[in-house]
Structure formats: C-alpha cells, structure tokens
Amino acid sequence: MDIKWNIVISVIKRIALPMAVGSLVLWLMSHGYDDWVPVICGTADNLGIVVTECK
C-alpha cells in the first residue's frame, strides 16, 4: 500500500503541480498581471517545483 501512495505523490509532484503552476503563470501573463509572475515562480522554486514557464 505504501508503494502505491509513493507513486501517486511522485506523479502529483512531478506532473500535476508543474502543469497547474505553469497554467497559472501563463494565465497571469496573458491577462496583464505580470507583477505576480515572479511571486508565483519564486514560490514554486522554494517548494522545489520545476516550472518551465518561469525560466
């Protein structure tokens, strides 16, 4: 049972969270909220989430 939870958590951390944060960054940029992008990218960086849109 523990291995299943480890797989689920790793998939969420490696795929789902970067996609959600990347979508948020793109939405902020396209709607003119460019001041919030460094905040979101900094938070993602501190949490260890790699987001390609932040580079």
Image: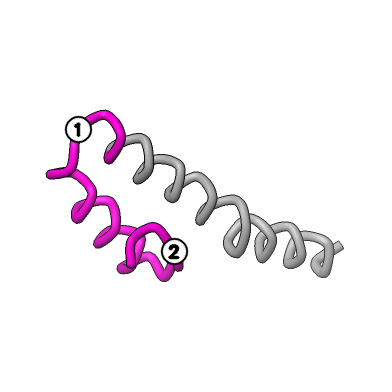
Q: In the image, 10: left or right of 18?
A: right
Q: Examine the image and state in which quarter residue 1 appears.
A: bottom right
Magenta span main SS? helix
Give the position of the C terminus as an image quadrant.
Answer: bottom left
Which colour style is shown? one colour
The residue sitting at 51% across, 56% down in the picture is 18
Q: In the image, 17: left or right of 6?
A: left
The residue sitting at 36% across, 35% down in the picture is 27
* Tag shown at residue 32: 1
Q: Amino acid at mark 1?
A: Gly
Q: Could you give the CA–CA distance between mark 1 and mark 2, rounded to whole angstroms? A: 19 Å
Nearer-the-camera pick, 21 or 5 = 21
Q: Say what secondary structure mark 2 lies in.
A: helix
Nearer-the-camera pick, 39 or 55 = 55
Seen in the picture, residue 13 relative to 16 is either above or below; the reply is below
The residue sitting at 19% across, 55% down in the picture is 38
Q: Examine the image and state in which quarter residue 49 appears.
A: bottom left
Residue 33 image point, x, y percent: 19, 35
Seen in the picture, residue 25 relative to 5 is either above or below; the reply is above
Nearer the N terminus, badge 1 or badge 2?
1
Nearer-the-camera pick, 6 or 12 = 12
Q: In the image, 4: left or right of 32?
A: right
Q: Say what secondary structure mark 1 lies in.
A: loop
Question: Would you name the residue on which mark 2 appears?
Answer: 52
Q: Which residues are magenta?
A: 29-55
